[in-house]
Image (cartoon, rainbow, N blue to C red):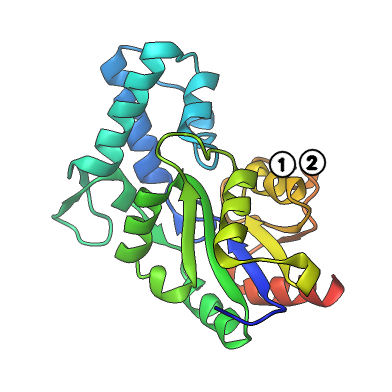
Amino acid sequence: MAQHPKKVVLLDLDGTLTKSDPGIIASVTMAFKELGHPVPDDEELHRFIGPAIQESMERNGLHGKELEEGIRIYRRYYSDIDYFDDPNHPGNKVPGRLYNTVYPGIPEQMQRLTSAGYFLAVATCKPEPQAKVICEHFHITDMVNGVWGASMDDSRLHKDEVIRYCFDEIGYDEAQGDRAVMVGDRWTDMDGGKAVGIGTIGCRWGYAEPHELEDHNATLIIDSVDQLFDGVERYFDGN
């Protein structure tokens, strides 16, 4: 564990480190089809990326037992069965969570941050066991100090809850000089950071809708992966 004062960089997973829309959208589509519900349009399907799956399904009319069944079907395609074509190894089949790619340039940016002494933590609303499998598969685990996510029982669901959980796990202590920033591509990341009293860096290469990052008061916004290190440096230099 790094000594105080730590400079903690919390990193969202979907849309920040990985281009995950193919697997999420395909798994959501299968869930709605099997339930016999109309599949949401493309714009709405992209809104599934970022928030907890429960929230997105509720927004699209699933409640009670039907919501539970929708989540079960989604997780089956997303986690349990090799159903989709692997974009990284043509000819292989993978579950939705591995129908996914790391954004070009992310490994290099993570290495720069590590070399500069930052404590790197994945903080995602994806259930933690799923997040850990994804991070291990794509070697993200080797790039960060740890991976923290939502709980499987929904007792830890929102981004601010995940951040607080991460802080508890790493012994984050602002009184001892620890500082942190939440880096992500969606409103959930911006609101989550604000809720715990830390700044945020919005990433335009992810899945934010027009003006979303501005409307949710990102501390600063970066346009491309190659700006990640410089954006983090700029944030900590100014805060």
Of 196 and 97, the residue lying toward us: 196
- Which image quadrant is residue 80 in? top left
**Residue 139 visible in this rendered orientation of the protein:** yes
Q: Residue at x 36, y 54 (%)?
A: 100
Image quadrant occupied by the N terminus: bottom right
Of 27 and 141, the residue lying toward us: 141
| Residue 41 in the figure: left or right of residue 213 | left
The reply to whether callout 1 and callout 2 are in contact (CB within 8 Å) is yes
Q: Which residue is drawn at 55% across and 77% down?
A: 109
Q: Residues within 10 Å of mark 2 (few under 14, many from 20)?
A: few
Label at residue 84: none
Residue 175 image offset from top left, x and y in percent = 80, 68
Q: Could you tell me the amino acid type at mark 1?
A: Glu
Q: Could you tell me the amino acid type at mark 2?
A: Asp
> Which residue is under mark 2?
215
| Residue 187 in the figure: left or right of residue 158 | right
- Which image quadrant is residue 169 in? bottom right
Residue 12 image offset from top left, x and y in percent = 55, 55
Q: How many marks?
A: 2
> Which residue is under mark 1?
212
Q: Which residue is drawn at 73% across and 50% down?
A: 196
| Residue 157 in the figure: left or right of residue 25 | right
Residue 90 image offset from top left, x and y in percent = 19, 58
Residue 112 image offset from top left, x and y in percent = 57, 83
Q: Which residue is drawn at 59% across and 75% down?
A: 119
| Residue 74 in the figure: left or right of residue 211 | left
**Residue 38 visible in this rendered orientation of the protein:** no
The answer to whether 196 is drawn above or below residue 215 in the figure is: below
User: Dot 1 lies on which element?
Assistant: helix
Label 1 to label 2: alpha-carbon separation: 5 Å
Residue positioned most to the bottom: 115
